[in-house]
Amino acid sequence: MSGLTFEGVVQQKRFPVVIRMRNPPLFCKTPYMEGNRAFLQLSTRRPIWNSKHKLWELPLSWFNDIVRKCALRWGTVYVIQPFNEMEKCARACWDALGLECNCSCMGKNHGTGQPSGRWYEISDACAILWEGESLRISVVHTKNRPS
């Protein structure tokens, strides 16, 4: 996955890109297909087309569902979300069910139950000052990719 850049991922047109920032809205850029608005709609709220940036604006709460739907439809989806290099990984990350991960593992241990290695649990959670934030790019694939 090395060599991925924010600009390169956002400008490619083959796979959808879901961008989750700390604050709403959620952004989704999809390859053009007739009916994308209806496909992305998960409730009575409608996706908003941002013509300046050529992407959809969605409620932040739709993050997990939109990533899953896009992965099922296109087989692959790029996910861009913030992480903090100073935040340490903990049981909350290991036991997570959703796709949101902000800690320093950058998703490596997310939802694994118990990561491999010699981890020493000091507590269930850890509070650390957020000094700075970076974006990470991950690629989500479905097990059964469409042909």
Image (cartoon, grey):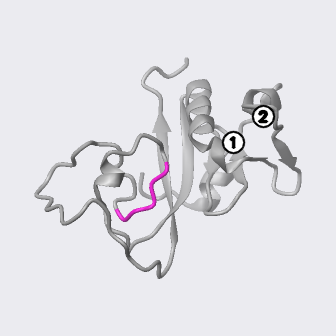
Q: How many marks?
A: 2
Q: Which of 7 and 59 is in front in this view?
A: 59
Tag 1: residue type?
Answer: Lys
Q: Which residue lies furthest to the left in this view?
A: 118
Q: Which of marks 2 and 1 is nearer the N terminus?
A: 1
Callouts 2 and 1 close, C-beta under 8 Å: yes
Give the x, y percent position of residue 145. 50, 22
- The relative height of residue 64 versus residue 118 in the rendered view (above or below) is above
**Residue 108, can we see it?**
no
Cα–Cα gap, marks 2 and 1: 8 Å
Q: In this view, does 80 lie to the left or right of 110?
A: right
| Residue in the image at 13% along x and 54% along y | 117
| Residue 21 image-quadrant placement | bottom right
Q: Which residue lies furthest to the right in this view?
A: 51
For mark 2, does the 10 Å Cα neighbourhood hold few (<14), some (14 to 19), or many (20 or more) residues? few
For mark 1, does the 10 Å Cα neighbourhood hold few (<14), some (14 to 19), or many (20 or more) residues? few
Q: Which mark is residue 13?
A: 1
- The relative height of residue 145 versus residue 41 in the rendered view (above or below) is above
114 within the magenta span: no
- The residue indicated by pointer 2 is 32
**Residue 106, can we see it?**
yes
Name the element at disc 1.
Answer: loop
